[in-house]
Image (cartoon, rainbow, N blue to C red):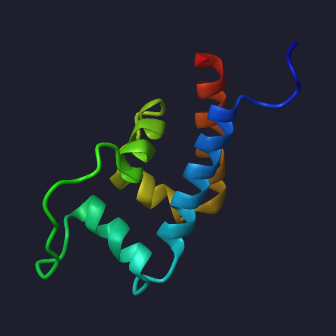
């Protein structure tokens, strides 16, 4: 039996991409924005990464979600500033993911 609700994976992707655009548009002095910039532009020289790292980072998940649209993190950052354009991208990504499952 199928329900009218979208698959959970589609909902999770939608929330990831919406949160990504929220962070992109937030104040550049905020820690979460600085961390995102470090992930896409490289960390500031004063930041040191501890030994080891997580196998799958949040940015890797976002990158995988954007691959279906042939978008990288850099171009997604610029698109996220335009809310209407980003909303269209998120809608397209979730629709494409919904057809893949």
Q: Is residue 70 left or right of residue 55?
A: right
Residue shown at the point (68%, 40%) measured from the top left: 11
Q: Is residue 17 left or right of residue 84?
A: left
Residue shown at the point (34%, 44%) measured from the top left: 56
Establish if 54 lies above or below 40.
above
Q: Position of residue 6 (x, y in %)?
A: 76, 30
Q: Quadrant of the N terminus?
A: top right
Q: Is residue 49 left or right of residue 74?
A: left
Establish if 90 lies above or below 27.
above
Q: Along the line of sight, which residue is nearer the eye, 7 or 65?
A: 7
Q: Position of residue 15 (x, y in %)?
A: 63, 50
The residue most toward the front is 51
Q: Is residue 74 left or right of residue 26?
A: left
Establish if 88 lies above or below 93.
below
Q: Quadrant of the C terminus?
A: top right
Establish if 74 lies above or below 45.
above
The residue most toward the bottom is 29
Residue shown at the point (51%, 59%) measured from the top left: 20
Q: Position of residue 70 (x, y in %)?
A: 41, 34
Circle count: 0
Q: Quadrant of residue 14?
A: top right
Q: Along the line of sight, which residue is nearer the eye, 90 or 57?
A: 57
The residue most toward the top is 1
């Amino acid at each position: 039996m199928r329900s009218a609700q979208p698959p959970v994976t589609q909902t999770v992707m939608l929330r990831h991409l919406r949160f990504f655009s929220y962070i992109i548009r937030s104040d550049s002095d905020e820690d979460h924005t600085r961390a995102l910039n470090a992930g896409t532009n490289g960390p500031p020289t004063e930041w040191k990464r501890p030994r080891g790292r997580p196998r799958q980072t949040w940015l890797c998940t976002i990158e995988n979600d954007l691959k279906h649209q042939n978008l990288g993190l850099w171009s997604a950052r610029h698109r996220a500033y335009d809310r209407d354009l980003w909303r269209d991208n998120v809608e397209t990504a979730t629709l494409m993911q919904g057809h893949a499952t």
